[in-house]
Amino acid sequence: MVITFIGYRGCGKSTVAALLSARLGWACVDADDAIESRAGCSISEIFAEQGEPVFRELERTVIAELLGREQLILAAGGGAILAEATRVGMRDAGPVVWLQAPVADLSRRISDDGSTALRRPQLTDAGVTAEVESVLTAREPLYRDAATIVIDTAGRTVAEVAAAVYFALPDEVTRDQ
């Protein structure tokens, strides 16, 4: 079984996944890290040098491989849900947790995170808030389609979000804890 975290960049997928991993004693993988390791360069470099379609194909391949593992917590990239096969694969592998966050929170986190600009490309020519609003609006139906659990992160600490996720998981995951 794989527990997959989805949501817009900056929603806390990687941080919450790591906390849940520690609580369950499962391995944790950030899909973006796995993609960069496979490619030997940053996601921004892949976008700049090879284009988004090449990145998305690599993302699909890496995530499909990870979804075949057992007792794994996977923090998927924000756009991983763009591919229907990936959404189906996530659901087939186990619970899919959508971490929702208000646009203002996402914009602030993205702006405050120095590594975001270096590792992840801007997706539009708009400013951060306008981009988040636009891209999130387009992706929300896909997040909703993929998710089996939806957690609102507004006003919660990462520890509170991780606890909410834990208690929303099926009994088969948490009964031995």
Image: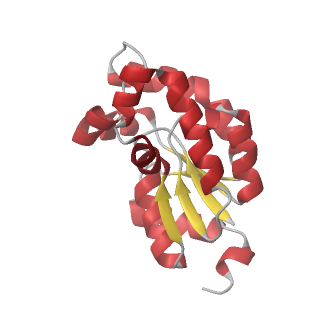
| Residue 156 in sight in this render | no
Residue 16 pos. (x, y %): 45, 60
Q: Residue furthest top?
A: 125
Compared across the picture, whether 147 is left or right of 123 comes to: right
x, y percentage for residue 169? 66, 67
Q: Viewed as shown, does residue 62 lie left or right of 70?
A: left
In the rendered view of the protein, which quadrant contains the C terminus?
Answer: bottom right
In the image, 1 versus 127, the foreground residue is 1
Rendering coords of residue 137 (x, y %): 57, 25
Q: Nearer the viewer, residue 89 or 175?
A: 89
| Vertical relation: 108 (above or below) 47 | below
| Residue visible at 43% across and 55% down in the picture | 14
Residue 169 seen in the figure: yes
Q: Residue placed at 28% from the left, 32% from the top? A: 117
Q: Quadrant of the N terminus?
A: bottom right
57 versus 130 height, above or below: below
Q: Identify the residue at horizontal 41%, vertical 52% (top origin).
A: 155
The image shows a total of numbered marks equal to 0
Asked if residue 109 lies left or right of residue 60, the reply is: left
107 or 30, nearer to the observer: 30
Horizontal side of residue 172 vs 77, given as left or right: right
Residue 133 location (% of width, % of height)? 47, 24
Q: How is the image coloured?
A: secondary structure
Q: In this rendering, is residue 29 above or below 64?
A: below
